[in-house]
Image (cartoon, rainbow, N blue to C red):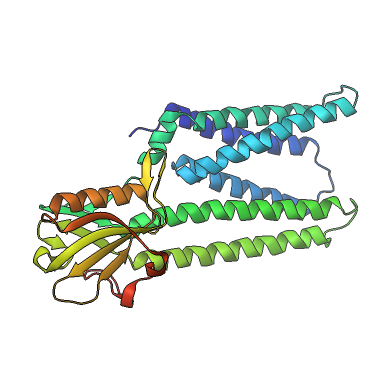
């Protein structure tokens, strides 16, 4: 699906928004600004454009979080500028005009990101990807789906953590005198925050990659599932925990898992699936198409206590 024009315009406006904020800050910049403050500007600019890159790639969570942030922050910027103008007796400074213009860019960008064509395109970027197409079935790259989903969620979490660090440093700095020097608590807090954000980010991405690596590929064909022929399978089910719900027109199953019961083994085999509703639908459709009559049980709700993987058994063809 082609990227909508509204999405391109929104990303362009959001890029201008941050440039406008930087421009407004430069207009009121002190000549004796510490190198720390320059570093802080570079750091938060990098964080903003990393977030904007996630929006450009079409991540639904990144877009949703961006819209919430824009509709929360931009009106505050406009209101703050109006209050400042009122306090100064109607005198308007260029930095205030730039701030208001940047906020208006943000609001328009948020509206554009909420258009239906942008939502449809964004959802299409996370649809189930077929790794390869066997002649008699379908193979799903679970590892890629897990990486895409978890990296998107973790990226949004890191954006929130970075914003919290900014707020905490700002609160500390607001309670200190202007001549506090470069060794002031807010400077130190910022440096500690940068180290923590970097450490959490590196550790989180390593963990995500290790978890995704264990998923491998799920193949559903006329012959069977992975290395299991249909003749060995008593039943096949997709199970979930809790209540299924419909979000943005897509039914979502929490804690989705593939459960296999065999004729020649007493224990069931289980494979946890990535938290990707589009992938779940594609797998269910493949099973319904290729399973012999009476083998595929569809979606089955399971009790909370059975959510763990029984005996740690995984499917043949999956990394152990």
The residue at the point 83 percent across, 44 percent down is 31
The picture places residue 39, in percent across and down from the top left corner, at 70, 53
Q: Is residue 256 visible?
A: no
Number of numbered callouts drawn: 0
Residue 303 located left or right of residue 56: left
- Residue in front for this viewpoint, 118 or 315: 315
- Residue in front for this viewpoint, 178 or 176: 176
The picture places residue 75, in percent across and down from the top left corner, at 69, 32
The residue at the point 77 percent across, 51 percent down is 170
Residue 147 located left or right of residue 49: left
The residue at the point 62 percent across, 55 percent down is 161
Q: Is residue 285 above or below residue 189?
A: above
Q: Write down the quadrant of residue 297 in the picture.
A: bottom left
Q: Is residue 121 visible?
A: yes
Residue 65 located left or right of residue 18: left
The picture places residue 194, in percent across and down from the top left corner, at 66, 60
Q: Write down the quadrant of residue 209 in the picture.
A: bottom left
Which image quarter holds the C terminus? bottom left
Q: Is residue 193 above or below residue 118?
A: below
- Residue in front for this viewpoint, 255 or 89: 255
Which image quarter holds the N terminus? top left
Residue 89 located left or right of residue 101: right
């Amino acid at each position: 699906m082609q990227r909508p024009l509204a999405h391109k315009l929104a990303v362009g406006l959001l890029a201008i928004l941050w440039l406008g904020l930087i421009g407004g800050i430069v207009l009121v910049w002190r000549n004796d600004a510490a190198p720390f403050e320059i570093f802080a500007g570079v750091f938060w600019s990098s964080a903003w454009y990393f977030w904007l890159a996630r929006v450009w790639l079409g991540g639904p969570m990144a877009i949703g979080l961006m819209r919430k942030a824009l509709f929360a922050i931009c009106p505050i910027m406009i209101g703050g500028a109006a209050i400042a103008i009122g306090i100064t007796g109607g005198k308007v400074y260029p930095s205030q005009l730039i701030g208001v213009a940047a906020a208006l860019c943000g609001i328009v960008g948020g509206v554009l990101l909420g258009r239906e064509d942008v939502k449809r395109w964004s959802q299409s970027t996370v649809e189930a990807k077929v790794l390869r197409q066997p002649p008699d079935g379908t193979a799903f790259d679970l590892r890629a789906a897990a990486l895409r989903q978890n990296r998107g969620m973790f990226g949004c979490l890191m954006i929130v953590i970075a914003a919290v660090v900014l707020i905490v440093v700002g609160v500390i700095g607001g309670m200190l005198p202007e001549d506090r020097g470069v060794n002031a608590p807010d400077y130190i807090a910022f440096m500690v925050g940068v180290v923590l954000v970097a450490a959490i980010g590196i550790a989180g991405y390593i963990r995500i990659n290790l978890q995704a690596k264990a998923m491998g590929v799920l193949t559903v064909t006329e012959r069977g599932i992975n290395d299991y022929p249909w003749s060995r399978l008593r039943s096949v089910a997709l199970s979930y925990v809790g209540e299924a719900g419909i979000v943005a027109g897509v039914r979502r199953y929490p804690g989705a898992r593939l459960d296999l019961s065999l004729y020649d083994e007493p224990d069931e085999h289980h494979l946890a699936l990535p938290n990707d509703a589009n992938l779940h639908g594609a797998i269910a459709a493949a099973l319904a198409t290729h399973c012999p009559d009476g083998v595929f049980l569809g979606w089955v709700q399971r009790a909370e206590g059975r959510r763990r993987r029984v005996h740690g058994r995984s499917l043949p063809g999956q990394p152990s």
